[in-house]
Amino acid sequence: MPFSKDFLWGGATAANQCEGGYNLGGRGLANVDVVPHGKDRFPIITGEMKHLDFDDQHFYPAKEAIDMYHHWKEDLAMFAEMGFKTYRMSLAWTRIFPKGDETEPNEEGLAFYEEIFKECQRLGIEPLVTITHFDCPIHLIKEYGGWRNRKMVDFYENLARTIFTRFKGLVHYWLTFNEINMLLHAPFMGAGLVFEEGENKEQAKYLAAHHELLASAIATKIGHEIDPENKIGCMLAAGEYYPFDCHPDNVLEAQQQNHDNLFFIDVQSRGKYPNYLLKRLEREGIELPIQEGDLEILAENTVDFVSFSYYSSRVAKVSDGDADKSAGNIFESVTNPYLEASEWGWQIDPQGLRITMNSVWDRYQKPLFVVENGLGAVDTPDEDGYVADDYRIAYMAAHIEEMKKAVELDGVELLGYTSWGCIDLVSAGTGEMSKRYGFIYVDRDDFGKGSLKRTPKKSFAWYKKVIATNGEDL
Ligand code: P53
C-alpha cells in the first residue's frame, strides 16, 4: 500500500474565491474584493492598473462568490460524506483585522472561523489553513503600499499570533503564504503591489519578497512557540520547467526558470538566500532590504513541510518571439508538442507531477503535501442538474496514479493530497465561475446569477471511493 493509513485526502479552497459575505460580520475590504471579472482583471492582478475601489462598470465575483459564508455547514457535511480527512481553506485577513493595522482583532471574524474548525473536528476533518491566500487588506495597500513596506511584517505577525493563540488545538496544519512565488507574476494578488509610474518594478517585487519571507519565518517561529504540535509549511506554485530540447541553451534556460520559482522555497526550507539569486540581483542592481537579525530569523525558522500546487509542467526555450507560447496561464511557457491542453490552454501532464515531486523532494528532503491539483473545465448539467464529469475523473485518476508512483517507486515522503476547488468556486486567474474544478456543482454563472444550489457531480462518488480505498481504486 503506497499511502499510509493516516494519509490526508481532501480538497482545497480559498476564502476570496468561495466565502463571499464581503461586507458582513465587520469584515473590511481586501485587494481581491475589488478585482473584477473581464478584460481589466489581468492588468489589475499584475499591478499595472490601479483599481482599489468598486465602480459600476465591472462585476466583482468575490463579493458573494459561492456564498460559503452562509453555506459552510452544508458544504462541510458534503466534504465529510466524501470522506475528507482534511480540508484546506484560507482565512480572510479582513474578517480578523478589517483594516489590517488594528491592535485588537474583530471578535466576530474569529468566532466565525472557530465555529468552522469545531465543525471540522466534529466531522473528523483536520483543517489545513492558509494564513493568506492572495489577500491583503485594502487599507494596508492604500496607506502603506502593500508588502513593499516593512511595516507589513508587523501586521502579519499580529495576525499570526492572534490566530495561533485563538485556534490552538483546533488547527495543526498551517501554510503561511499561498503560492509565494506568484508574487513575481501577479504582484497585486501576491503582495498588494500597484506600481507607481516610473517605479523599478523588479526592485519593488524583491522588497515585497523579502518582507513576505521574513513574515513567514516569524510566523513559523510563533506558531511553534504557541503550540509545538503545529506543523507549518510553505507553498509553491510548482510545475517543473522542462527544456524545450537538449540544446544546452534551453537546458540552462529551464534551470534558471526553475530557480526563479524555487528561490522562495530555498529560503523557507533551507533557511538562506541561494547564491544564484544573490548574484543575479547584484548584477541587476536590485537590493534586498535585509536588516540586522533578518538572516538569523530566516535561518532559525524553516518550515516543517513543503506544499505545492501542480496543474501543469512548463517548457523553457531561449526566446525567439511569442509565436509558440502556450495560452491561458500567468506563467510563461512555450507549448509542449507531446501534451494535450485543457479548455483554458493549460497543458495536461500527469507524469510531470511525479517529476515535480521528485525534484522538490530531492532538493529539500522534507515531507511534501500536494495542496492543489485539478482540472478547470466547463460542466454542463443535465435536466436534473447532474454533471457527468468523466474528463475530470480521468485527469485526477491519472495524476493520483503518478503521485502513487512517486511514493511507491521513488520513495518520496508525502503527507496528503487536496484537490483544488473541491466545490466549484471563482477562478483566481479569470474571475469566471464557468472554469469549474469541483466534485460539487454550484448553480451560479459568471455574472452572479443562479440559485447557489449544490449538487454532487459524478466525480463526487468517484473521489469518495478513492478515499475509502486509500487510493487503490482509481
Ligand atoms: P485558476 C495560475 C493563475 C492563477 C492562480 O487557477 C494560480 C495559477 C496556478 O498556476 O494558482 C492557483 O483559478 C491558486 C488558486 C487558483 C488555482 O491555482 O486561475 O492557488 O487560487 O484558483 C487555479 O484556474
Image (cartoon, rainbow, N blue to C red):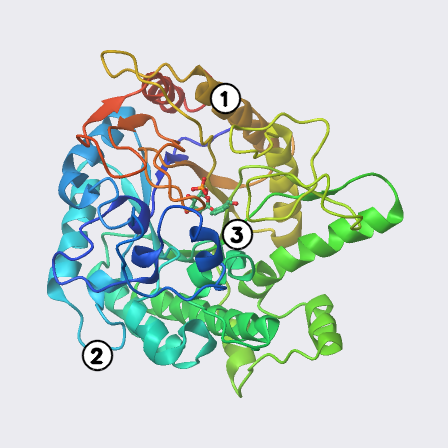
Categorize mark 2 by other alpha carbons within 10 Å: few (<14), some (14-19), many (20+). few
Residue at position x 55%, y 48% in the image? 330
Badge 1 is on which residue?
397
Horizontal relation, residue 24 to residue 159: left or right: left
Residue that lies at the very extreme toward the front in this rendered image: 57
| Lower sequence index among marks 2 and 1 | 2
Residue 279 seen in the figure: yes
Which image quarter: residue 125?
A: top left
Q: How far apart are the two marked residues, 2 and 1, measured between alpha carbons? A: 47 Å
Q: Percent x, y for residue 362?
A: 66, 48
SS label for mark 1: helix
Q: In this view, does 142 lie above or below 340?
A: below
Categorize mark 3 by other alpha carbons within 10 Å: few (<14), some (14-19), many (20+). many
Badge 2 is on which residue?
103
Residue at position x 64%, y 38% in the image? 326
Horizontal relation, residue 314 to residue 97: left or right: right
Q: How far apart are the two marked residues, 2 and 3, measured between alpha carbons? A: 30 Å
Which residue is more in the foreground, 90 or 444?
444
Which residue is more in the foreground, 401 or 383?
383
Which image quarter: residue 386?
A: top left
SS label for mark 3: strand
Tag 3: residue type? Leu
Badge 3 is on which residue?
236
Tag 1: residue type? Ala
Q: Is residue 53 above or below residue 360?
A: below
Q: Do the residues labelled 2 and 3 touch (CB within 8 Å)?
A: no
Tag 2: residue type? Thr
Residue at position x 61%, y 61% in the image? 266
Q: Percent x, y for residue 306?
A: 51, 51
Q: Is mark 3 within 8 Å of ligand 1?
A: no
